Every structure is written in C-alpha cells, then in structure tokens.
Image: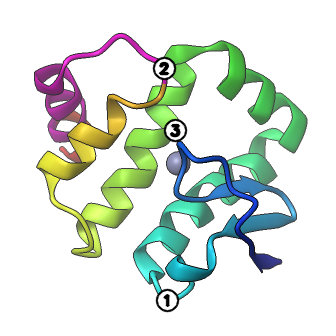
Amino acid sequence: MIISSKLILARVDALTVLPFVLIPPEARGNSALLLHEIVHSREQRNCGVLPWLLLYAISARFRMAAEVRGYLVQIAAGSISLERAATLLMQYGVDITYEQAGCLLVSARG
Ligand SMILES: [Zn+2]
C-alpha cells in the first residue's frame, strides 16, 4: 500500500515498512523512487519485516548494502546518477567517504 504523506522524516526521501510505503506528495510520480522502495519491500517480505528493520537499524553494513541495492535500481532507471547515489549513501549514519560509496555502487553493479 503506497501512502503519500508529508509525515516522512526529513532525512529520507521515502520509507518502507511493509505493507506500507510512505512517499511525500511531491515524489508521487517518481517511479524510480518507488522502485527503490520496492527493493526494500521485497527484502522485508523475504527476511520478515521486523528482522529487516532491526538489522537496518543496528547494522551499518546491512543498511549500506540495502541502500546500495535500492540506489542501483534508481541508477538503472535513469533517475539518479552514480555520483548522486554516492552522495546520498553518505547520509545513512555510516562513516563512509564519497569515494568509498562510489566504489560500493560500482562493485555491486558488476
Ligand atoms: Zn532505501
């Protein structure tokens, strides 16, 4: 269920907690962002919502891997550049440089 709401934390573009995907009204037409959130919803369905959320909250490595997968989908959809994704990856509470974030994206892209 996709909910368009302004009740999104200021630091994130959207938030997925199955069965909900919260997206700010101004991003409703952003299909690539939806694809990013669908990646998270698929992972939550496969892992279980609570285990996924706990791992996301406590493990920087898990959180970074999840976001890399999400941003790779957005890059593939042409909505953001690799450089923009690398910049965004630096905003997830992980001590990572721009160069390291770019390397993660390139390595995961294969
Ligand atoms: Zn994400």
Structural crowding at the residue carrying mark 1, measured as other residues with C-alpha within 10 Å and reported as few (<14), some (14–19) or many (≥20): few
Q: Position of residue 93 (x, y in %)?
A: 48, 20
Residue at x 42%, y 47% (from the top left corner) = 69
Q: Which image quarter is the N terminus in? A: bottom right
Q: Is mark 3 within 8 Å of ligand 1?
A: yes
Instruction: Say above or below: 55 vs 6.
Output: above
Q: Mark 1: which amino acid?
A: Gly
Residue at x 25%, y 63% (from the top left corner) = 75
Instruction: Say above or below: 13 vs 53.
Output: below
Q: Give the camera-side residue of 64 and 84.
A: 84
Query: Considering the numbered disc 1 on the image, is that residue within a helix, a strand or a loop?
Result: loop
Whichever of labels 2 and 3 marks the residue nearer the N terminus, that label is: 3
**Circle 2 is placed at which residue position?**
93
Whichever of labels 2 and 1 marks the residue nearer the N terminus, that label is: 1
Instruction: Say above or below: 46 vs 1.
Output: above
Q: Mark 3: which amino acid?
A: Ala
**Circle 3 is placed at which residue position?**
66
In the displayed structure image, the side of residue 52 where residue 76 appears, left or right = left
Q: Give the camera-side residue of 96 and 105.
A: 96
